[in-house]
Amino acid sequence: MSYETYQKDYSNKFPAIEDLAIKAKSRIPHVAWEYLESGTGSEYLLQRNKEAFEAITFTPQFCKGHIEVDVSTQLFGQSYSCPIGIAPVGLTGLMWPKAEHYLAAAAKRYTIPFCLSTVATETPETIGPLVGNNGWFQLYPPKELDLTVSLLNRAKASGFHTLVVTADVPMASRRERTKRAGMTIPPKITPQLIWQGLTHPVWTYETLKHGLPRLRTVEQYTNTTDFKFVSGFVGNRLGGTLDWQYCQKLKALWDGPVVLKGVLHPDDAQRAIDIGLDGIWVSNHGGRQFNGAPASIEALPDIAAMVGNQVPIIFDSGIRTGLDIMRALYEGANFVMLGRPFLYGIAALGTYGADHVIHILKDDLKNNMVQLGITSIEELKSHK
Ligand code: FNR
């Protein structure tokens, strides 16, 4: 059965991302929900991401007759059906078993990018064929260059064509909320966790059927499935190594576009361009890394002014509606990505959850563009 079979039903029951979030929360154990939702520190930045979007308004003009909107766009020489993509999310299978499979398949059906995380719960070899020509690969750069080369070769051989290097994790952030929820590494089976499993039977059934979430890509380097060891590897050897020289090496190693993710300062954007990187990804990691940072949308205009037309700007953090997408494109982004909303979709609806997220966002984007009388992404970007 296809998504179209469910679309009308879904559209009435879940007209907004918010509806999917409510459903997702009821379907997944508390600890997984807290991992997905959490920010860092007091989580003020989560709120700020939201409020800064809401502060951007447009004054519409009317009487333009029938308006036909086309939201297709180009990025790095490739055509996408809309300027929306799926951001990398680690431990994806914790939120819903086989989530990466569903995300990749939806990306392929709708011709939008899906960026696989280094610490996803599936390997590039499994996901590459499912995502077709829409695969991006996100790198947390390993300390040892031979590991980097091996990871990049595997991603490339699996069909991923765009490399995303995450800059904004110089060390793991403090996520007080996930600690309070009882998330430990390795997971400890506590009465609290058993109760959460029992009270979320569909999640538990699917998890038992497909196997507990594992950091499969990283596992292959450590030759063990010992979660504690693998997590230690992530903490000790994938963090705190990135500098401009390393970025330059990655550019030389990767035959394809290289994007720097987590940029908030215009000088960093220019530095990345100067060393030959192909794209800037403005992000505050969905409020998960540094609670003192500005909202991504607040940082965007200065970066856009610095970057101009040198390279494309990708944007994320806090987008929940088509109107937010319109705001980000208007403020200077060429393309937007979303993290949590796609996981809400999958956790709420399973196989076609990501399809429904795309449908909501695309529909809302088009609807808001009609309010402004704008017919294309190019026109929106130059709208004044
Ligand atoms: C992330 N993000 C992330 N980024 C990255 O480069 N590598 C990763 O492995 C992860 N993992 C991850 C896990 C979870 C649970 C979340 C919510 C986020 C950040 C992600 O790519 C993106 O920047 C944010 O999710 C964007 O914010 P929204 O759309 O979630 O508000």
Image: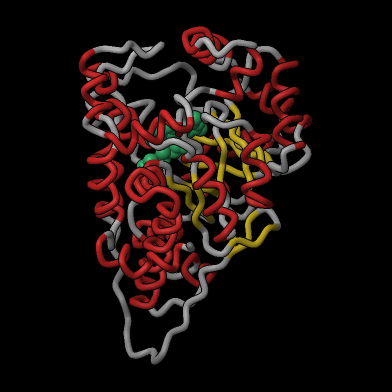
Let me know if residue 152 appears in the view: yes
Residue situated in front as seen by the camera: 232 or 225:
225
State how many labels appear. Answer: 0
Image coordinates for residue 14, horizontal then vertical, percent? 27, 59
Image point 44% across, 55% down: which residue?
352
Location of the C terminus by quadrant is: bottom left
Is 359 rendered above or below residue 140?
A: below
Image coordinates for residue 124, horizontal then vertical, percent? 65, 34
71 relative position to 49: left or right: right
Image point 68% across, 22% down: which residue?
246
197 relative position to 99: left or right: left
Residue situated in front as seen by the camera: 206 or 40:
206
229 relative position to 348: left or right: right
116 relative position to 339: left or right: right
Let me know if residue 331 appears in the view: no
Image coordinates for residue 331, horizontal then vertical, percent? 43, 56
Image point 62% across, 37% down: which residue?
137
Image point 35% across, 43% down: which residue?
347
Is 376 rendered above or below residue 98?
A: below
Is 265 rendered above or below residue 180?
A: below
Image coordinates for residue 161, horizontal then vertical, percent? 70, 44
Quadrant position of ligand 1: top left
